[in-house]
Amino acid sequence: MKLYLDNEIDKKLSELYPKEVIENAKIGVIDYLGMNITEYKDSDIIFKIYYDDGHSREEYETKYKNDPLIDFLYEKNMVYFLEIVRDKDNTECTRFNVGLKNLTNENVMSLFAWLEKNVSFFAKYKDEILKLSEIKRYMNEDYKYSSFFFIGIVKDETGIKVLKCYWLNKNREPHEIFNDDYHLKFLEESGIKQFQELIPLTKEAIKNCGRHLCMTGIDYNSECSEKHKLYVDYPTDVYGGLLKTFPENEELKKKIILIRDWHEIHDEFYCDGFTIGKDSENKLVLNIYFKFKKNYEG
């Protein structure tokens, strides 16, 4: 990945990440480059690098190994893909995401039992997580909780500090792949205030940006649900649509334009999707995700 140091975002990337990380930013190594922005005044863009499944598995085996949750999921043959995440130049990665497979009722219940035993705060949120996991993905009752598709952890030497839970909002047969009305209605009726507040904005963003709702996420810690997120995939007009969605939010607009200007000089990327979220202070959060175009040879 080439950086243009007269661009504000590229300059920040050069300061945050070692040279070898930037030089190794290419297809087959990096899956996503994420940029997170908030409506907090003058807050910085938060960058995250999400590593490709093959690269992440190799790095896990050679550097990290023996994470109890990941090893449990491997034993259950539930690892669809593994994703190591870096948000700065940390030498010891503390963030992992796992895409899940074999989501039978038995496997999901075993996973929840493991989490309840090994994550001190899981029980606090278990009923909510179980309820959201009943969003329909298959009609087969042997896969009642299969929308619980993705899990992430942030950890330190004492264990898991943040548990990230994600639910897929794409139905399978006999429904259409996308069914925004069903999923938004389910979330609206969930009783979760943050989603009820985000749904009107998400509907507006889907209309303005194009495409569909694809995933729901909540980040949990011992104190609170620290972030609620709704994901929209493959937008056709991400910047114009987001600026139209938040016409009076000057802080978000300023940062959206900053990212738009960066993207104009980095046509090796396309925007794969974005999230609209709220944090524990009820402030808006936008996450924008970029992938390399398949024909990029950098």
Image (spheres, rainbow, N blue to C red):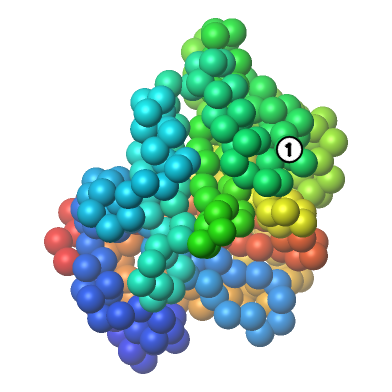
Other-residue count near label 1 (Cα within 10 Å), few / some / many at <14 / 14–19 / ≥20 = some
State the image coordinates of residue 185 (x, y, percent, origin top left): 75, 30
The answer to whether residue 93 is left or right of residue 158 is left
Residue drawn at 63 percent across, 65 percent down: 243
Amino acid at pointer 1: Ala
Which residue is more in the foreground, 79 or 32? 79
Where does label 1 land, which residue?
A: 123
Residue drawn at 59 percent across, 69 percent down: 37
Establish if 181 lies above or below 106.
below
The answer to whether residue 289 is left or right of residue 267 is right
State the image coordinates of residue 221 (x, y, percent, origin top left): 69, 54
Residue at the far bottom: name it: 6
Which quadrant would the N terminus be assigned to in this image? bottom left
The answer to whether residue 191 is left or right of residue 98 is right
Residue drawn at 54 percent across, 9 percent down: 142
Residue at the far left: name it: 297
Establish if 112 lies above or below 33.
above
Using the rendered image of the protein, determine whether residue 155 is visible from the camera's viewpoint.
yes
Of helix, strand and loop, which one carries label 1? helix
Using the rendered image of the protein, determine whether residue 203 is visible from the camera's viewpoint.
no
Residue drawn at 59 percent across, 8 percent down: 141
Establish if 10 lies above or below 298.
below
State the image coordinates of residue 150 (x, y, percent, origin top left): 50, 38
